[in-house]
Image: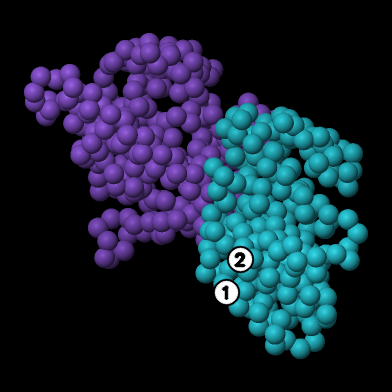
Amino acid sequence: MSNWLRGKECVANNSEHDKRSDGPSRWSHCRKRGIDGNLRANTEANGSNGEKSRHSDNSYTHSDSRHSSFTTPESNGPVTRCNRRMDWGSQMEDEEMRRGVHKDMQRRRILAAEGNQRERKTSSGSSESCDSKEGDNMETDEAVLLRRQKQINYGKNTLAYDRYLKEVPKHMRQTGIHPKTPNKFKKYSRRSWDQQIKLWKVKLHAWDPPAEESQDKVLNNIEDLDIDDVMDIELDFPPLTDSQAPSASLATHSLSLEDEDCSGTPVKIQKTENAAESGVTANC
Amino acid sequence: MENSTEDYRIQSFDLDTQMLLKTALKDPGSVNLEKVSNIIVDQSLKDQMFSKEAGRICYTIVQAEVKQNNGNVFRRNLLNRLQQEFKVREDTRRRSLQEWVCYVTFICNIFDYLKVNNMPMVALVHPVYDCLIRLGQPDALMNEEEVDCLVLQLHRIGEQLEKVNVQRMDELFFLLRDGFLLQEGLTSMARLLLLEILEFRAGGWMLSSTAHKYYYSEIAD
């Protein structure tokens, strides 16, 4: 899993959008927001935006049909075309996320320092035995934190998460049973982190809103991986050819990387599904 | 604190559009925000009075959307539309000075109002500077409307702009000094405006009382 880079979209040509075909995926009903960022419940009010009920995270858009990553002779695997999204809308969202992560870091540092002080006062002698997972062992690499935050946002931007929050207040959460958001500040290997995220999201599916299927069926489907659980896998799809004429505004009918992924079920995903199935623990 | 709808200066729109805008302010989730942002941008490019104040209504809609469902569809559409217009600004200027001036007024107004955590929007800083520096070019200084637009924007947002990037402000003011001093064919009004803005910045983004008296004493209060 660590070989695969996450392809970040680069909007270089803002005057065109790429519209991937067809309708909702089977996870669409779990998404809080449609492709245009509007809440699902309001698809009627949004006219032509309403048909595009595909699952996407509204903070991810790209609006051209080019590959967002390539494998070059010099690189070991797919590399992103460019690291920053160039449209102003996305720039502002990225900026906000960066600020959010920095605030989290500050808060975490302060709390960690405080925690250590309290520990020293109460513990008998050895200060090593306390929670030294924070402090020196904190993950501080901004790129890593941002990437992790994006992954967390994907999971939180779901109806399942909303429903979960409503149903189980934080103080009622029981370890092991209730999904817990992975802590982005702890040091983990890339593989370990990605696996934690995957498992967390799989657990969250227990709170998916029922579609036509009964609640039971939804629970049985938990073992199936959500497509965005494998979002870190770079898939070499040829660009889909249907694209619409540019409309007056930009980047509104645009797609996330996840949509690119769901145009088929390549072998790589199938393999990962199997791996996940064997790794998934029993869920409620 | 709720602004009365008069503050948003939407009287120039037809009644249906006014209704749409009012709904967007109260219940953004129920309207097509892309359409709303296009309406606002289109009007700002035509109507100078509106372009001066459109930032306020945009700000309110952005806040309302965040509050209602933590969304930012409106903001994203607005910014991307602004970017689109920015890309073709030279053509716009060639085609219609009025529209170009409206665009600059509008983007500066958005810069003024749409802050994130009380910080100006990062994505807009350079584009705003690009526009103002364009207005400081010799060919633009020949047009009073462009000079007037330039000094108005600097009055409103100059201080903020300087805080986020002082080098570019210096760059702009080099142009203005040169223009004032060397450029032939400037109207006396243009020179007056330039002199005033030079003094304004030199005074820390305000005019001394004597300077104020010099420039504004003729004007009825």
The answer to whether residue B22 is left or right of residue A275 is right
Give coordinates of residue A29: x percent, y percent.
Answer: 53, 26
Give how far apart the Cα atoms at labels 1 and 2 are: 10 Å
Q: Nearer the viewer, residue B149 or A20?
A: B149
> Callout 2: residue from which chain?
B
Above or below, comparing residue B131 to residue A189 in the picture: below
The answer to whether residue B141 is left or right of residue A223 is right
Residue drawn at (76%, 88%) of the image? B184
Q: Are marks 1 and 2 in contact (CB under 8 Å)?
A: yes
Tell me the shade of chain B: cyan
The chain coloured purple in the image? A
Tell me if residue A270 can be seen: no
Give coordinates of residue A236: x percent, y percent.
Answer: 37, 51
Q: Nearer the viewer, residue B220 or A27?
A: B220
Rendered-image quadrant of the N terminus of chain A: top left
Choose top left, top right, bottom left or bottom right for residue B68: top right
Q: Which mark is residue B171?
A: 1
Residue under label 2, please give it: B129
Residue depth check, mark 1 versus mark 2: number of the one nearer the observer: 1
Give coordinates of residue A92: x percent, y percent.
Answer: 53, 49
Q: Nearer the viewer, residue B193 or A93?
A: B193
Give coordinates of residue B3: x percent, y percent.
Answer: 77, 35
* Badge 1 element: helix
